[in-house]
Image: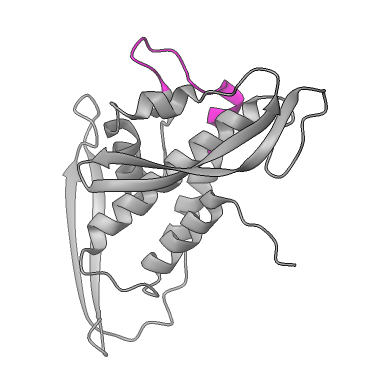
Amino acid sequence: MSRRIPASERTREGLRDLIEGRLSSQSGRSELVQLATRLIIEEGLVAEVRDAPGRDYDEHCGEPGGGYRNGVRGGRLKTAEGFIDYAAPQVAGSDAPFRSRLRGHLKGNSEAPEDLAIEMLELPVLDIGDAFRDENGRLLLSRTAVSELGERLCADYQEFATRDLNEYEISNLFVDGTAGRIRPEQRREPVLAAWGLAVEGK
C-alpha cells in the first residue's frame, strides 16, 4: 500500500523539479512563482487545521467530536500570475463544522502570499506574518504556526540556495546584480542573478 503524501509535499516536489530542470516550462518564472505561492497557501491551510487540537495530517483528534483530517478539497485563487489551483485540507467528524478563515481571506487578498513567494525565492530572511493577517491586522494562524511555517519556508530557501550545481555542464555564464524593494516600505535589497547556458542548450 503506497503512503499518502500531503498536497503541500507534492507541491514542494514539483517546485524542486522545476528548479532542478526536471520539468520543462515555456514560462519558467511565472510557473516558479505560481508553485511557490501554491506551496505557501497549502502550508498555511495545513497550519490552520493543525492549530485545532489533534488535527495533524492523517491523525484523529483525541477528544470525541473533535474531528479528523479527511482528504482535501480543491480551490482556485486568481493572482497576477494567473489562476493558481491548490488543495485545502478537510476536517470531518467534528461537532462544529470547520470553516477556514484563511481560505475566505485569500479570495480577495492574493497579493500577500504571492509577494511572499517572490521574496522566498530571492531573500534568505522572511517576514511571513503579514501574509496571514486579515484586513483588521489579526493573525489568521497561531504565532506558533506562523513561526513553524517560517522555519519550513526558510529551510526550503536554504536548500534552494545551497544546492550542488556540479551536474550542469555550463558553456556560458551571465551574472548581473540589482537592488530593489520587495515591498515599498522596505530598504533596497541587493540581488545577484546568474543565468547559465548548458551545453545541450537549456
Please determine whether, in this image, residue 24 is positioned above or below residue 200. Answer: above
State the count of labels: 0
Q: Residue furthest top?
A: 136
Q: x, y (%) of residue 51? A: 63, 26
**Residue shown at 82% from the left, 23% from the top:** 63
Instruction: Look at the image and tell me in which quarter the N terminus lies.
Output: bottom right
Please name whichever residue, 118 or 194, is drawn nearer the observer in this view of the structure. 118
**Residue shown at 42% from the left, 60% from the top:** 15
Please determine whether, in this image, residue 89 is positioned above or below residue 94. Answer: below
Residue 109 is drawn in which quadrant? top left
Instruction: Look at the image and tell me in which quarter the C terminus lies.
Output: bottom left
Q: x, y (%) of residue 126? A: 41, 37
Please name whichever residue, 125 or 21, is drawn nearer the observer in this view of the structure. 21
Q: Can residue 178 be seen in the rendering of this structure?
A: yes
Q: How is the image coloured?
A: one colour
Q: x, y (%) of residue 89? A: 56, 39
Residue 176 colored magenta? no
Q: Residue furthest bottom?
A: 200
Q: x, y (%) of residue 88? A: 50, 40
**Residue shown at 53% from the left, 51% from the top:** 7
Please name whichever residue, 167 or 9, is drawn nearer the observer in this view of the structure. 9
Q: Can residue 130 be seen in the rendering of this structure?
A: no
**Residue shown at 66% from the left, 24% from the top:** 52
Question: Left or right of 173: which side holds 50?
Answer: right
Residue 54 is drawn in which quadrant? top right
Question: Left or right of 107: which side holds 103?
Answer: right
Residue 186 is drawn in which quadrant? top left
Please provide the residue range marked out in magenta: 133-150
